[in-house]
Amino acid sequence: MSELSVIIITHNEQENIKRCLESVKWSDEIVVVDSFSSDKTVDIAREYTSRVFQNKWSNFSQQKNLALGKASSQWVLNIDADERVTPELKKEILTIINSEFQSFDGYYIPRKNHYMGMWIRHCGWYPDYKLRLFRRGKGRFNERIVHESVVVEGRKGYLKSYLSHNSYKDLSDHLSRIDRFSSLAAQEMFKDGKKAGVFDLLFRPLTRFIKMYLLKKGYLDGIYGLVVSIMGSFYVFTKYLKLWELSRRRIR
């Protein structure tokens, strides 16, 4: 019978971590790597697992690879603190990892994203597949500053049941994360030698809005779809504006 390790990285997640851990307490092992939270995140995590580690923040991929290195089970499930494993997903995961015929080394899991309490069915936010379940030893997180993902050697399949994801607490939280992640994304692009010009600032944000709101039918989610599409466009604008700023500093 195969065992499952759940890995989670945290920082000041006391509002989310209990629901997250409650949804995976059935697993064989939970590994939490915390970057020295100043709230009760660590105390709550220790109610569910003794395998809680603290490590100074470096970047997402390094934190997750550290958590992966602490895992000991044959299979690994990587989830975020603001996500929950549904009962249906639990059942599907257990069926898969305990099957005699395991033809895949990794599995994409759909996410059901909620925005301000509303399930966003369009805008490209559903099914929003993420590669989260994989054999230990077959997967490792790519070395990126932001938007890291696990790279799995071998065949990949898709699960049907979804992860429940509460994406942002409110608009202020969304704007704060846009500021943070756009800075990281700009640094990543700058490191790769990319530059930003007038075209990027004018047309890339517009293209993102058209894709989310019209092509991905965000309008069917009402005002929530409009807000999500505008925020997506603003993220792209901010990312390229910061890339332009980094290039300008280099020239000076």
Image (tube, helix red, strand yellow):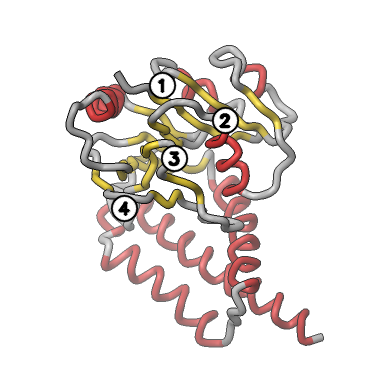
Asked which secondary structure carries label 3, the reply is loop
Q: In this figure, which residue is indicated by the disc labeled 4?
A: 222
Residue highlighted by disc 3: 137
The disc labelled 1 sits on which kind of residue?
Ser
Give me the residue at 60% from left, 82% from top: 195
Residue bearing the label numbered 2:
70
Mark 1: few/some/many CA within 10 Å (<14, 14-19, 20+): some
Q: Residue furthest top?
A: 47
Picture quarter containing residue 76? top left
Left or right of 53, for residue 149: left
The image quarter containing residue 135 is: top left
Image depth: mark 4 or mark 3 in front: 3
Identify the amino acid type marked 4. Gly
Q: Is residue 99 left or right of residue 2?
A: left
Among the two numbered marks 2 and 3 on one chain, the one whose residue lies closer to the N terminus: 2
Q: Indicate the secondary structure of the residue bearing disc 1.
A: loop
- Residue drawn at 31 percent across, 45 percent down: 108
Disc 4 and disc 3: Cα gap in Å? 44 Å
Q: Amino acid at mark 3?
A: Gly
Is the residue marked by circle 4 packed among few (<14), some (14-19), or many (20+) residues within 10 Å? few
Does the CB distance between marks 4 and 3 fall below 8 Å?
no
Q: Can residue 113 be seen here?
A: yes
* Residue toward you, 146 or 178: 146
Q: Which mark is residue 23?
A: 1
At x 31%, y 42%, the residue is: 105
Mark 3: give few (<14), some (14-19) or many (20+) Cα within 10 Å. Answer: some
Q: Amino acid at mark 2?
A: Lys
Tag 2 secondary structure:
helix
**For numbered disc 4, what is the local secondary structure?**
helix
Q: Is residue 172 visible?
A: no
